[in-house]
Image (spheres, rainbow, N blue to C red):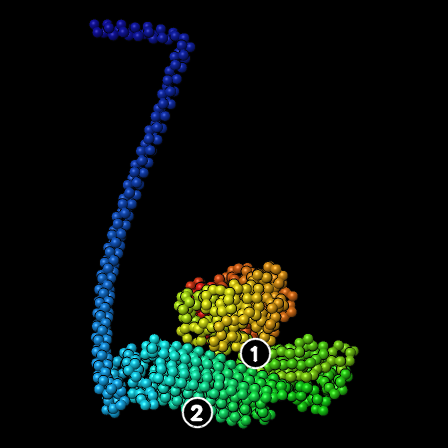
Amino acid sequence: MVFQDKKTQTDQFLVSSREFSGLKLKHVLKFLSSLLLPLALGVFTLIISLQQQQLAKQQREEDRNASKQQRIEDREATERLREQDRNLSQQQRIEDRIAAEQLREQDRNSSQQQRIEDRIAAEQLRQLERTLTNERYQKEVLDTYIKEIGKLLEKNHGSLISNEVAATLARAKTLNIFRKLDSQYNVHIIRFLYEAKQLTELHEHPSLDLSTAELHDMDFRDSAINKRILKRLSMTSIFLTNATFIGIEMEHVNFADTQFDTVNFSSAKLRHVNFSHARFDHANFSFTSLMNTTFSLSQLKNINFSSTRHEDVDFRFAALENIDFSSSQLKNDLSYTQNLFLGCALASADFSVTRASDTDFQQVYCVAARFNKTDLSSSCFRQSNVKRALFIDADLTDVSFLDANLYKANFSETTVTDEQLRSALSIQNAVLRNGTLVHDTNLINNGQADCNIPLVNHWTLLTGNIITMKSDNNTSNCRFVLQALNTSASMFQRLNLSKRWNSTSWSYTQVVFSAQMSPNVSIELRGINVNDSVVARQALSFNKENVTMILRKDMRELEIFIEFTVPVNQSTTSYWCDDIRLFIVYDAYGEFQQVVPDISLNAQWANNGVTVAGGNGSGNTINQISSPHGFFIDDDQTMVIADFRNHRIVQWKMNDTNGQVVAGGHGRGNLLHQLNQPTDVLIEKETDSLIICDMWNLRVLQWSRRHGTTHGEILVDNINCWGLAMDNQKCLYISDTENDEVRRYQMGDNNGTVVAGGHEKGDGLNQLDFPTYIFVDRQHSVYVSDYVNHRVMKWNKGAAEGITVAGGQGQGSALTQLSYPNGLFVDTLNSLYVADRENNRVMRWSQGAKQGSVMVGGNGRGEGVNQFHYLEGLSFDRYGNLYVVDHGNHRVQCFSIQ
């Protein structure tokens, strides 16, 4: 049965196969094509799927790798963080340990400091206790002494001297008390005895003997009545050290045989005071009035009598050494008989109508001193500087002037002899009895040509030939001329200085050289050093017949060199020279109004300054100045300062802690005893007066320096003055900030002549813009601080325009620039020094230099010893030390030359 079914199925299959085979080809193809499309889609889908799977696999691999890398980086970052944490922890622990150690150190230091402070406090407390104990002790001793002396006075009816035992006991007790008590209590002892009239000396009542007492640091103003008056005090044969008598009125006081060491009598009034046989060392009597006072047989050393008034003062047989009588007034019956004035300063002192016979004025500085009608018989002025001194109608019998400088001294109405004058070092321009001038011998041998003397006797020919020949116009006049057929020639003569000039004794000395000559002849004065090198030169010409030269320490000789240069085919006799003169002016201070030291080009100054005036803040006490401006230093280092905000001029001597008001000081105003913001000041030595630029009063005043002067006199008014200068012909130069010019005035002339600027405000070479400080050299060239143009201009004498000698490159701090220049100074080598205001420095510009160099300052604005706060004036003293007005710090600084 089964097989039948299989057979049937097979048949059916065969039938079907045959039917299928019978299908047409197109149907097959159609069928196949219907199958290919799905197949292709499937294959494409498969390929896409495979690619996606591959990409997914790659992505999974990359993700695994990235994840692995991230895990690695995370592990590394974590490790780094852990390392950093470990390092930070270690650093923190180190810092914590250091901080802890520092804290412990601070605690230790604090404890130590606290212990030190505690010890200091304890010591101060003990010191205070000792001081209080000492004061209690001294008060008890003083009270006990007063009680005991009181009992003695009561017992002896008010006089300790009336009973010898009481006098001896009182003397012993007093001397013992002086040794026990401090100065403030010793003053009470003196006052007690003085008020008890035991130190009062009358004919019937001698004073208590306190001889041999040693008293230190005593202020006698505490003993005086109302701190002003001491009358009939007698303290003889005692020792006084560092005592003060300032401003006290003393009358009938006896200090005979007393030894004074460092005492101050300044501004005191002394009448009938006895200093006979006394010994003084370092005493100040400045601005003191001395009347009927005796210093006979006393010894005085290092005493300041400047600006004092002497009337009926007796210095007979006294020995005086290093005494300053400058600007003193000595009147009436004064006696200096057999005095010794060795090394004293008597400049401008007035000895008129005094007795000074047989007095030794050896090595004395008495420039411009007055000896009119003075008995000087048998006195000695050996090696003294007596320049411009007045001896009118004085008795000069047997007076010695050996090696003295008598330049411009006046001997009118005296019997001074030729022999006396010949022994002097210099008598140039001195006035004789009949009013004629006497001159020194010309130091040039055969300087006035002599046709009877061979030229070769004194002159040395170098080239060509020079002869002497009488002038065509004046047959009595002989000249040096070029010999015929010569077109050029030269000759010279040398002068040895060793026997004519001592640089130590006469440190600031100049030679005056003059000659007459025709065109094409030149004459040169040369300074020669020990190496035979020329160290200085000044030339004469047809248009310049006289010059001056400052003698320098390194000069050994002077050489006069003459050269003729004649055009070809011209007569040689038309070219000539004659009247060649040279003389020496010893101690030329005062011939020029400002000290001009000889400073080397390589000179340097200390970096740090020393305050020599002010420096105690802005104020109007005598140890203060306020916004100082202009400044002048005299040859004795006395400074006068324009105290701008205090409307006064103050004078400050070297090493003084306090200044003195010498003009103004009566408040701001326009009366003649007042000033209104003065900007500059100078000293006019011939009249011993101040010239003051009273800026806001639009005037220039002259104010005498003599004691008692209360007001000034107007020299020039209606001028916006700022700076002042004076030349050696006494011409005054004033800068005018309103008209932007500098004018020169003859004394008594109120108009003046423009010598710089005057062409309106501007920066041209013939213009200025707010000129402030000025300087005039020996050739009368004017140097001007052209303030707003930040430059310094030099105007040669008679020039129509100036020359820029410093700055001029705009405002700035470079070495070629300045910033509002102020004070000026030009030394003997024509080096220019400038107070560079807002750069807070002092600069030096050598002659012809394109840039300057900083000498001091330049360390920023400040109040340090090497700093400034805006500069104003500057100057130098005779030794080359530099002085600078430090405006904003209200002080004057001195920088020592190295």
Residue 424, relative to residue 33: is it above or below?
Answer: below
The residue that disc 2 covers is 317
Identify the residue at image location x=23%, y=83%: 150
- Crowding around mark 1 (Cα neighbors within 10 Å: few <14, some 14 to 19, many 20+) is some
Q: Amino acid at mark 2?
A: Phe
Report which quarter residue 138 is drawn in.
Answer: bottom left
* Visible residue check, residue 118: yes
- Of the pair 145 and 619, the residue shown nearer to us: 145
Q: Which mark is residue 591?
A: 1
Q: Earlier in the sequence, mark 1 or mark 2?
A: 2
Identify the residue at image location x=40%, y=12%: 30
Report the quarter where the N terminus lies. top left
- Crowding around mark 2 (Cα neighbors within 10 Å: few <14, some 14 to 19, many 20+) is many
* Visible residue check, residue 362: no
Disc 1 vs disc 2: which is toward the camera? 2
The image position of residue 563, as x and y in percent, is 68, 80
The image position of residue 265, as x and y in percent, is 39, 80
- Of the pair 144 and 200, the residue shown nearer to us: 200
